Amino acid sequence: MSNSTPNPSPAVQTFGLSRVYGTLTALDNLDLTIHRGDLFGFIGSNGAGKTTTLRILATFLSPSAGRAEVLGHDVVSAADSVRHVIGYMPDFFGVYKDMEVTEYLDFFGACYKIPTAQREKTVNDVLELVGLSEKRGALIGALSRGMQQRIGLARVLIHDPQVLLLDEPASGLDPRARIEMMAILQELQRLGKTIIISSHILSELQTLCNRVAIIERGKLIYSGPVQGVRQQMSSGLIYWIKVNSDAGQALELLKTCPQITAAESVDGRIKVTLVDHDTDPSNVAEILVRGGARLVEFREDEVGLEKVFLHVTRGETQ
């Protein structure tokens, strides 16, 4: 008998989730699984269905077909239970600019029925978490856009939700504010939160998230580990080779290699495409060395998530 403990149930699951607006299909039979503790990137062009998905998970929108669960609670039949375990931050949210930071957060603490004696500590804790303790007495309207976004994040953390749904949280922020926001999200993941973040800033999601989903025209194209995107979405692995010998001879050697589908000279280097991701690149290096080539560089092409995204989607919206 195995002593291994079973995997915990997923944080978020959708089953054939669809949403139709008249003749417009915003979500088309979406099956998605997000594990507990994931920092999950939800990637798609404008109009792809990201916001619709997040609004359904946040209980603000009912699905036309299919269903969704958050921590085992159905988003329609157990909407109140879902609202207690999620924090939802829309892409555009209003703030009461004439309120002080602590007043604003205290107000939302009261909405979540946090006892008065406990609220001051809760407000101080979330402000410390988002790095704005020194701004507790400031008027929200006097804060920068980046600070207002962090106050918005503090607001959704006030009731200590286990799952965060963040729709474009870094939208419109300058580079420094964006980096600060991403650092806060990593800290929240370390604290055990499950975070779903939709964003167009693909290069940042590549380093920030452990798993991603790509959606287009309401359909799921890919869902899985970040490192698996390239493997599933690109046809073959690309390597760059440089030799300290006759480059023409090296190129001819490579063209005879059955593990290679293409080899060409580019700016003093040789670009080779392997047959598939299971091909052992050391075989290619061995053919070169045996043929008398002197290798000075042999490296895998750094194909970013953004390049893969542009390759597999057509930027189509409904």
Image (cartoon, grey):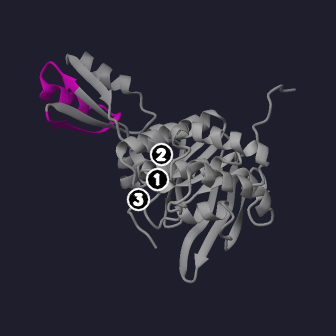
Q: Provide residue 286's location: percent of width, then percent of height.
A: 31, 19
Q: Can you say whether 9 is above or below 67 in the image?
A: above
Q: Identify the residue under disc 2.
A: 232
Say which amino acid is labelled 1.
Ser
Is residue 235 visible to us here? no
Q: Provide residue 241's location: percent of width, then percent of height.
A: 24, 27
Q: Residue sitting at 67 percent across and 74 percent down?
A: 64
Give the alpha-carbon distance from disc 2 to disc 1, as whole Å: 21 Å
Where on the picture, by quarter, is residue 191? Answer: top right
Give the alpha-carbon distance from disc 1 to disc 3, as whole Å: 15 Å
Q: Give yes or no for residue 109 being in the magenta stretch.
A: no
Quadrant in which the N terminus appears: top right
Q: Which residues are magenta?
A: 242-267
Mark 2 Cα shell of 10 Å, populated few (<14), some (14-19), many (≥20): few
Mark 3 Cα shell of 10 Å, populated few (<14), some (14-19), many (≥20): some
Q: Identify the residue under disc 1.
A: 199
Q: Provide residue 76's location: percent of width, then percent of height.
A: 75, 66
